[in-house]
Image (cartoon, helix red, strand yellow):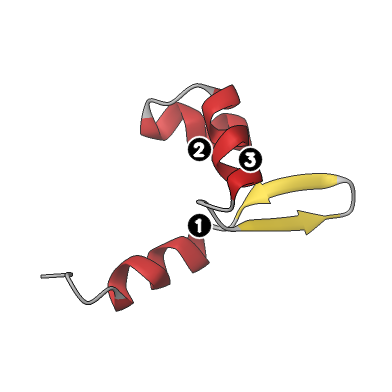
Amino acid sequence: MTIERFAELTGLTPDTVRGQLQQGNLPLIKVGRRRLVNVAMLTAECMNAEDWA
């Protein structure tokens, strides 16, 4: 998912999302020159978290 779309859906600013990607708090996937938020990996990490449900 694009950084802009992820920011729009989460209510964060695009700069905040970029910062979270740079710090490694959000999973990143590179497709060519584009950097995208890896929503599939983020979902899997959340589902596998021990404190889930």
The x, y position of residue 10, in whole percent, is 38, 34
The residue at the point 17 percent across, 70 percent down is 51
Q: Which of marks 1 and 3 is nearer the N terminus?
A: 3
33 horizontally vs 17: left or right? right
For numbered disc 2, what is the local secondary structure?
helix
Q: What residue type is labelled 3?
A: Thr
Amino acid under label 2?
A: Phe
Residue carrying label 3: 2
Return the residue nearer the eye: 34 or 24: 24
- Mark identifier at residue 31: none
The disc, 1 or 2, on the residue closer to the chain's N-terminal end is 2
- In the rendered structure, are the residues bearing label 3 and label 2 in contact, judged by CB atoms less than 8 Å apart? yes
**Cβ atoms under marks 1 and 2 closer than 8 Å:** yes
Q: Is residue 39 visible?
A: yes
User: Disc 1 designates what residue?
Assistant: 39
Q: Does dot 1 land on a helix, a strand or a loop?
A: helix
Residue 28 x/y as whole percent: 65, 55
Q: Is residue 1 visible?
A: no
At 89% from the left edge and 46% from the top edge, which residue is drawn? 33
Q: Mark 2 points at which residue?
A: 6
At label 3, counting other C-alpha atoms closer than 10 Å, the crowd grade (few under 14, some 14-19, many 20 or more) is some
7 up-or-down from 32: above or below: above
In the picture, residue 52 is in which quadrant?
bottom left
Where, by quadrant of the figure, is residue 29 drawn? bottom right
State the separation of the CA atoms marked 3 and 2. 6 Å
Q: Which residue shows up at 46% across the image and 27% down it?
A: 8
